[in-house]
Image: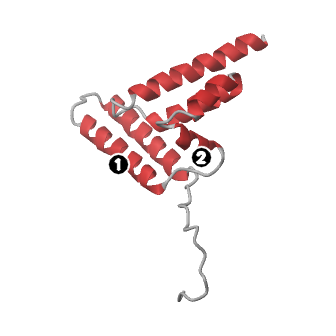
C-alpha cells in the first residue's frame, strides 16, 4: 500500500509538472502553482525527483525559496498576474459559452489570490555596513 501511495504522488507530481510546462506556451494554464505542486508531490514521494526539481536551473530557485518560506519576488508576482489577466481577458472575446467564461474568470481570480497571498521574497540588502562616516 505504501508503494502504491508513493507511485500516486509521483504520478501526480509528473502530471502537474507536465501541465505546468505546457502552461509556459499556453497562457491559460498557470505554470508556477503547478510546478510548486509538483515539488510538493515529489517531496512526498521521491527525494531524487524533488532534488532534481529544486536544483533545476530554470525554476528550481523559485521552488526552493517558496518551500523554505522565503516567498516569491514582487516583480514575479506582478508579472504573473498581468500575464494571467491579459490572456484570460483576451480569450474571453473568442469564447462564446458563458459557463466557460465564468470558469475562466474564477480560475484567474483564484490564481491571482494565490499569487498575492503567497509569501513575498524580501529583496537582499547591501552587504556593506555603514562605516560611521556616511550620513543616514
Q: Is residue 54 above or below residue 128?
A: above
Residue beneath disc 1: 82
**Image position, residue 107 (x, y; %):** 43, 37
Q: In x, y percent, where is residue 36?
A: 56, 35
As drawn, the residue found furthest toward the left would be: 94
Q: How is the image coloured?
A: secondary structure
Q: Earlier in the sequence, mark 2 or mark 1?
A: 2
Q: Which residue is mark 2?
A: 65
Question: Looking at the figure, which quarter contains the C terminus?
Answer: bottom right
Marks 2 and 1 sit apart, C-alpha to C-alpha, by 22 Å
Q: Which mark is residue 43?
A: none
Percent across and percent down for residue 1 are 78, 10
Between residue 90 and residue 24, name the one nearer to us.
24
Residue located at (71% from left, 16% from top): 5
For label 2, the SS is helix
Residue 40 in the figure: left or right of residue 83: right
Which residue does the image show at 57% across and 28% down from the upper left?
Answer: 38
Amino acid at each position: 500500500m505504501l508503494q502504491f501511495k508513493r507511485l500516486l504522488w509521483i504520478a501526480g507530481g509528473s502530471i502537474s509538472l507536465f501541465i505546468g510546462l505546457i502552461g509556459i506556451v499556453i497562457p491559460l494554464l498557470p505554470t508556477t502553482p503547478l510546478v510548486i505542486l509538483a515539488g510538493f508531490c515529489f517531496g512526498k514521494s521521491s527525494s531524487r525527483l524533488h532534488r532534481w526539481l529544486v536544483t533545476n536551473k530554470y525554476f528550481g530557485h523559485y521552488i526552493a525559496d517558496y518551500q523554505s518560506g522565503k516567498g516569491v519576488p514582487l516583480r514575479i508576482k506582478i508579472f504573473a498576474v498581468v500575464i494571467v489577466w491579459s490572456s484570460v481577458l483576451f480569450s474571453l472575446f473568442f469564447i462564446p459559452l458563458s459557463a466557460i467564461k465564468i470558469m475562466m474568470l474564477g480560475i484567474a481570480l483564484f490564481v491571482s489570490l494565490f499569487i498575492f497571498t503567497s509569501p513575498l521574497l524580501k529583496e537582499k540588502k547591501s552587504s556593506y555596513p555603514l562605516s560611521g562616516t556616511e550620513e543616514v
